[in-house]
Amino acid sequence: MQHGKYRFIAGFLVLPLALYAVFVISPFVQSIYYSFTDWTGLSSDLRVTGLDNYRRLWHDDIFWQAVGHNVLLLLVLPLVTLGLGLFFAFMLNVGGRRRKNAAVAGVRGSSLYKVVYFFPQVLSIAIVALLFQFAYNPNSGALNSFLGAIGVDARPEWLGNPHLALWCVTAVMVWSNVGFYVVLFSAGMSSVPRDFYEAALLDGANRLQTFFRITLPLLWDTVQTGWVYMGIMALDSFAVVQIMTVGPGGPDYSTEVLSFYLYTKAFRDGQAGYATAVGVALLIVTMIFAGIVMKLGRRERLEY
């Protein structure tokens, strides 16, 4: 009977595992192989060059600039996005005035606020990037027009300044993603029993203490998963850089990221072999980041 059961289970697993191997594992293996060649991507002719592409990566200053920008995004983007998401969700669900027969309550109209926060998720990232490109326009953009309206004479070249361009891109990515995590964390907070908050408030805890002692520990698994997703998004910031920035990738490579560098080498310069080496490096960075987050974020699971 046991042998028959395993055969029955294997019958259901064969097709999905085969599809996963063909469409997921196989492209990874092929990419690793092509990274050891001089393939142009324009013909079937290629020659195995060993570690030449990786030696070239090691001495490529633009590549290391892109790595630095991605590391900066890895540190800043998840921290700011998830921090704002937790703050807004906590305020919406627990930050309202105390009402009769309720120790804690959300703000009035919280459902409407959640829809407003979630609205950027309805828009394509290409549309968001294009809208902010117009907003950052130094001559007629909304941001400089607002500064002029309040009496500020300075008109910064937001996307034309190498010191500001990457931060402008980061701000757009935060704005476009924070609403999703507000809704996600709000759903998690709504499932936390109100008795926990009431008991803590009766013991003299303030709302800041209830957040760090009750809300955050009970939402930790969700926060950890969100951190991994935001990290992957930070590594895959191609669309925003391609649409918004000068060059794109500039000025002076100040917004160059690994995904865009891969694209330019493969489709602009016809260096597909070198581009796949960049892709392998991007895969390694992604795996290292996910492993660090899962390792550092591991803690005892809390149930309620």
Image: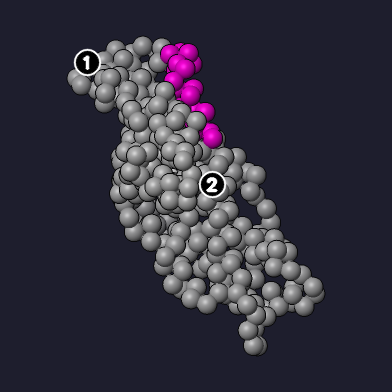
Identify whether 69 is placed above or below 23: above
Q: Quadrant of residue 262?
A: top left
274 on left or right of 75: left
- Name the mark on residue 45: 1
Q: Position of residue 167 (x, y in %)?
A: 49, 38
Q: Which mark is residue 283?
A: none
Q: Which colour style is shown?
A: one colour
Q: Residue at x 57, y 59 (%)?
A: 86
Residue extending farthest to the left is 43
Q: Is residue 118 visible?
A: yes
Mark 1 vs mark 2: which is more N-terminal? 1
Residue at image x 67%, y 53%? 299
Q: Which residues are magenta?
A: 54-72
In this view, which residue lies farthest toward the right?
A: 203
Q: Which residue is mark 2?
A: 78
**Label 2 secondary element:** helix
Q: Nearer the viewer, residue 238 or 34?
A: 238
Q: Amino acid at mark 1?
A: Asp
